[in-house]
Amino acid sequence: MNDGFSLLWPALLETLYMVSVSCFFAFLIGLPLGILLTITGKGHLRPNPFVNKLLGFIVNIGRSFPFAILLVAILPLTRWIVGTSLGTTSAIVPLTIAAIPFVARVVESALKEVDRSLMEAAIVLGCSLRQIIYKVLLVEALPALINGATLTFVSVIGYSAMAGLVGGGGLGKVAIQYGYQRFNPTIMVSTVVLLIAVVQGVEWIGSFISKRLYLKRGKELNT
């Protein structure tokens, strides 16, 4: 029992490491994918039905794929990328792949909320596509993107716990090996409490940043 409790703190750090790195790479790929989904949509900056439907199809497949099956299905890819299918670092591969389509839809939803009149004004002023994307769409959608990033982080935390089923590290591994397999409900409850605490902390930080951005923009609009 003591061994299990002594592993809780390192396991928490491993979980934060897995989730943070996975979300970073997921946004690195999912953000441009979400932008493409948005601007190629009907009536947007660069409408292209074929590209939009193809990307949407790929994203929908990724979102509908059960994570537990994904973990096992891409074990060869995980070994090829990191050299092993076990451990904390190896879990980053499936976590990233699972989060990419989620991020893409979050970004698409956030960008579609931007007032079209702002884009039209930028077009009239002669702004390039890149300028409209980076200086209008992403800037105006930033609070919504922060909320989306929070949701993504929380979702990946849940996925990371499942990674313990196939040898991934973190709190999921401790819960399974020291809680479930050794019939120790105290360890199980402790890991659940830690996961809930992390989720609550992430949601509070995300909500705080998002509200500050909204309030700042509200003050700017009133001046």
Image: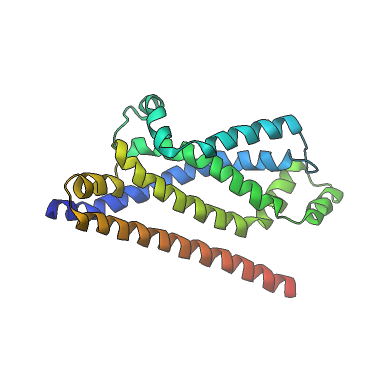
Residue 14 showing in the rendered view: yes
The image position of residue 91, as x and y in percent, is: 36, 38
Depth check: give the residue in front, 94 or 210.
94
Q: Locate the C terminus by quadrant.
A: bottom right
The image position of residue 116, as x and y in percent, is: 79, 53
Q: Residue furthest right?
A: 124
Q: From the viewer's perspective, is residue 162 above or below residue 219? A: above
The image position of residue 113, as x and y in percent, is: 70, 55
Report how many numbered discs are placed on residues in the image: 0
* Residue located at (78% from left, 41% from top): 42
Specify the quadrant of the image occupied by residue 209: bottom right
Depth check: give the residue in front, 61 or 132.
61
* Residue located at (25% from left, 54% from top): 188
The image position of residue 215, as x and y in percent, is: 63, 71
* Residue located at (55% from left, 38% from top): 29
Q: Locate the N terminus by quadrant.
A: bottom left
Colour pattern of the rendering = rainbow
Residue 223 showing in the rendered view: no
Q: From the viewer's perspective, is residue 78 above or below residue 149? A: above
Depth check: give the residue in front, 135 or 90.
90
Q: Residue furthest left?
A: 2
| Apparent side of residue 220 relative to residue 158 in the rendered image (left or right) | right
